[in-house]
Structure formats: C-alpha cells, structure tokens
C-alpha cells in the first residue's frame, strides 16, 4: 500500500502540486439476505484502489484508479494535477486549508469476532431460522432477514508527511415482517428499519441482537396492525422511540450542520441548509434540555461515524453542535473551517471508497441522554401518541419542513399506553419541533444507532453515520395518517 501511495505523492509533487494526499483502500464486503424461506442474496466482493487529491494553481484536482501498476499510478497522479490546473480557470478563490499537524499512526477498531471468519453457512442457518419464526405467524406474507459485513483497510499519506493506517469492521443485521391484507400493507422491523442495526463492530453485534427471539413478536405486531385503528389527525404530544429520534437527528440536525451545504459548495442529492452563518451561536435551535454533539471518538461508542482520523488526516473529535438548545457548531473540513475563520477542522471529511473524493459527512451526531425511563415518561404524559420505528421520511432541501411516518404507534391516555395505532405520521418545522422537546429518557435507553444509507454528492456517495438517541417527548405536534 505504502509503495503505491508514495509513488502517487511523488509524481503529483513533481508535476507541480503544492499539496497532495493519497488514500489507498482495500474494501471487502459480504451481504446475505433471505426471503420467505429462501436465500435471496449471498455476495462477497473486494475492491482495492487509490485516490489522489491535489492542489495546483490554487484549485483542487482528484483522480483514482484500481490499476496499481507503476505506470498507471504515475498517470493518475499526473491527471489529478491536470484537473486541478483546469479547475483553476473557474475558481472563485484559491483553496486555503486550516493547519493540521503531521501524524504517523496505526489504528484498529475493536472487533471481537471477525465476521469474515464466520462461515456463510452459519450465517444463513441463523437467518433461515429467523425467517421460519416470522412465517410461523399467520398473516405474514413476506419474511426478510439480512446481514451486512464490511471491512475497510485504509492508508492515508500526505505531502506534509502524514502516514495513517486504519482498519475497521462494520456489521449490520435485521429482520422485517410484512403483512398484505386487501389493499393494505403493514410491516414491523427489528431492531430498526432499513437493514436493522449497524455498528463498527464484529459478529458479536449479531449475537447480541438475538434475532430469533425478536422475530415472532415483530411478526405478530405486523399482522395486528391491520386490526388497529388509524392514527387520529390533530395536534397532540408525541413520544418518539429512540431509533426514530435518531432519524430525526439525521435529517433535521445532521444534514443542515454540514458546512459545505451552508456555504453553497455542495447542494447535490439532499440540498443546502437553513443554518446560515449568522445563526451560529445565536439561534435557539431547540429547548434548553437538548444537547447534541458530533463525536467520532471511540469513547462515544462503536458508531458508523467512529474512526481515529478522517480522510484529511484530522484526528477524531467531539464537537458541540447544540448546547442547552443553542446552535454552536458546524461539521467542517480543513477548507471550510478556514473559509469561516476557524483555526482547525473538526475532522468530518470522509469518502465512500477510493474512487470518490472526500466530502463533509456526519460522524456520530448524537442527542445526549436526559433522565428517567420510558415507562416514567409515558406515565407523565396525559394525552399523546407513542411512535416507533421509521417507515418514511420527507424533508425540504433546506432541511426545515419535514414529515415522517413510523411503522406503529400507541395512543397514550392518562399516562398509559392504550390502543395500537396504524399508519402514524407527524410533521413540523425543524426549530419549532426541537424547541417543543421537554423530556429525554436516560442513559439506560440511549442507543448509538447506525444509519448505513446516507446519500450525498454527485456522483452520489452512500456512507454510514451514527446517531445516539433515547426516547423523547415533543409537545403539541401535528400528527396524522401517513398511508391509507
């Protein structure tokens, strides 16, 4: 790896680059899924290549290759410099980078059981057992399970002399029970929708999820939803389950704090942001009990946004985003930090693979826990709805107006969960919604959820992010029916 990367650096600097960094990455992925008692997918892939980013004539250039022969590495480095020089004709200003120290380090993320040492047959045997439990419930018409393993071995080299090797393993698993009846579809997922739970860990995560034990209850709820009442329309208090709070953070806090969106340097796929620079340290984003951090450090937990260094060689950090409801921080790169006069990047530049340029991405953007149990919170709610597990989301391209649907809801009357509700949804305006938050459950309910499918950029890059969250209550929210 080092030989390829150093050759690319040397060529770029010899061709006139004023700065260059190289990422050499070896990625292995295994994805397994079952559907109604059959193996649906079983694929194993590996990709290795090199991406080089340079500054020449005050502009960026990027090029990549999976051909690691000497002549090809020289060609791709030279091409990156050519692209930078061509880009310089259209630049508005010279690229300036916030300073960063030279780093030489080697980091391996904790992984107790390497998932790639677990036989595929063992994984499929477990998944088919889960599948059988789902289909044992009358009324389940589609049973699905999945496991997703990913290992990234990355070497980062830069012209100032940084040399950083990182190895991390990511694991995801989950199940879905879907019930068709008449013209209605209901579903229940465990432990979360859209693939389940994902973390930077090994196969031990699969073991801890205990999918078999949770299969039948999920299936029974999917079927029972057909008999449930529709979610009433109106304004009421809402308690969101932890994973739904995680998605709410992702869409209405995580994306708008990406500074490249704020500066107008990135608007692809998910738009820009309402968090203009004049709002920093001034906007009351949320109620005083709301505290949010962007934390990539291992101390925060094994999230999909956990690492030792970002793709600019900047160390992982914990950055306050919202303190006692006040908006206090963006996600930054070396370039964007310099653009707004900050002395240092907070280390959020990441790329999907060796053939993609790094972008500002969420790390683990988490709501810090409050106190008390979910039972206590429900008991303290006179009238409202408890909603759990995301089913759909919609938010405008400034991340301000939103509507979310969940898989299931329960009516709360005089402090008790009563009837099950189907097709619940809620909507609002980002700052009004977060300012209505008046209770957050304690650390015993706090989970660092993984979102593996966050899209950004053009061509789109799909990255994993983490969101620590506990159930929370929001007052006087507009609720309704997401599906008929």
Image: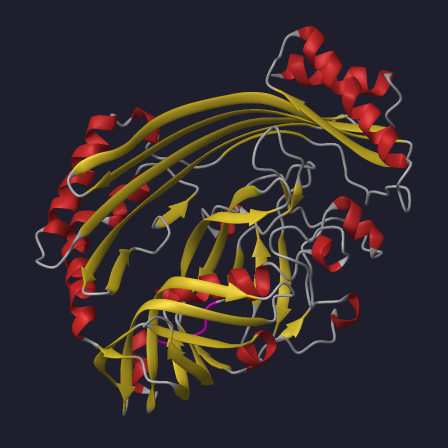
Q: Is residue 310 magenta?
A: no
Q: How many marks?
A: 0
Quarter where residue 418 is shown: bottom left
Quarter where residue 383 is shown: bottom left
Q: Quadrant of the N terminus?
A: top right
Quarter where residue 214 is shown: bottom left
Query: Is 179 placed above or below 51 here?
Result: below
Q: Residue at x 15, y 40 (%)?
A: 37
Q: Position of residue 396 (x, y in %)?
A: 59, 66
Q: Which residues are magenta?
A: 369-373
Is residue 182 toward the left or the right of residue 32 in the image? left
Residue 155 appears in the rendering: yes
Pick whichever, 142 or 190, lies toward us. 142
Q: Residue at x 63, y 33 (%)?
A: 356
Query: Is 181 placed above or below 17 here?
Result: below
Q: Position of residue 192 (x, y in %)?
A: 34, 56
Is residue 446 toward the left or the right of residue 397 in the image? left
């Amino acid at each position: 790896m080092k030989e390829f990367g150093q050759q690319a650096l040397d060529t770029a600097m010899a061709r006139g680059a004023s700065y260059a960094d190289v990422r050499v990455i070896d990625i292995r992925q295994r994805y397994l899924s079952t559907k109604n008692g059959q193996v649906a997918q079983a694929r194993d892939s590996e990709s290795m290549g090199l991406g080089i980013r340079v500054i020449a004539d005050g502009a960026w250039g990027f090029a990549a290759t999976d051909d690691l022969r000497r002549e090809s590495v020289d060609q791709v480095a030279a091409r990156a410099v050519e692209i930078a020089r061509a880009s310089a004709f259209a630049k508005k200003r010279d690229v300036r980078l916030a300073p960063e120290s030279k780093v030489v380090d080697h980091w391996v993320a904790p992984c107790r059981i390497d998932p790639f040492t677990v036989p595929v047959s063992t994984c499929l045997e477990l998944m088919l057992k889960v599948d059988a439990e789902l289909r044992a419930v009358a009324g389940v018409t589609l049973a699905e399970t999945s496991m997703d393993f990913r290992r990234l071995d990355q070497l980062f080299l830069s012209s100032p002399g940084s040399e950083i090797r990182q190895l991390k393993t990511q694991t995801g698993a989950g199940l879905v029970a879907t019930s068709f009846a008449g013209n209605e579809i209901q579903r229940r997922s465990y432990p979360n929708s859209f693939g389940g739970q994902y973390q930077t860990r090994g196969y031990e995560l699969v073991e801890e999820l205990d999918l078999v034990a949770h299969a039948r209850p999920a299936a029974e709820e999917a079927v029972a939803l057909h008999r449930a009442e529709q979610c009433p329309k109106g304004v009421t208090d809402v308690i969101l389950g932890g994973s739904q709070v995680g998605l709410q953070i992702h869409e209405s806090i995580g994306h708008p704090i990406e500074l490249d969106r704020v500066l107008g340097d990135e608007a692809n796929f998910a738009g820009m942001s309402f968090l203009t620079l004049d709002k920093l340290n001034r906007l009351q984003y949320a109620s005083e009990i709301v505290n949010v951090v962007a934390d990539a450090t291992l101390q925060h937990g094994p999230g999909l946004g956990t690492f030792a260094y970002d793709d600019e060689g900047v160390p992982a950090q914990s950055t306050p985003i919202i303190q006692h409801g006040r908006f206090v921080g963006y996600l930054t790169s070396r370039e964007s930090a310099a653009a707004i006069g900050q002395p240092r990047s907070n280390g959020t530049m990441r790329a999907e693979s060796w053939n993609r340029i790094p972008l500002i991405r969420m790390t683990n953007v988490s709501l810090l826990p409050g106190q008390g149990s979910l039972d206590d919170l429900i008991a303290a709610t006179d009238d409202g709805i408890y909603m759990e597990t995301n089913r759909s989301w919609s938010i405008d391209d400034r991340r301000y107006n939103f509507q979310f649907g969940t898989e299931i809801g329960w009516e709360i009357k005089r402090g008790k969960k009563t009837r099950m509700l189907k097709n619940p949804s809620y909507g609002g305006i980002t700052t009004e919604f977060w300012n209505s938050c008046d209770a957050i459950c304690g650390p015993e309910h706090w989970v660092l959820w993984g979102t593996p499918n966050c899209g950004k950029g053009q061509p789109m890059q799909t990255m994993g992010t983490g969101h620590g969250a506990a159930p929370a209550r929001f007052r006087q929210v507009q609720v309704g029916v997401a599906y008929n």
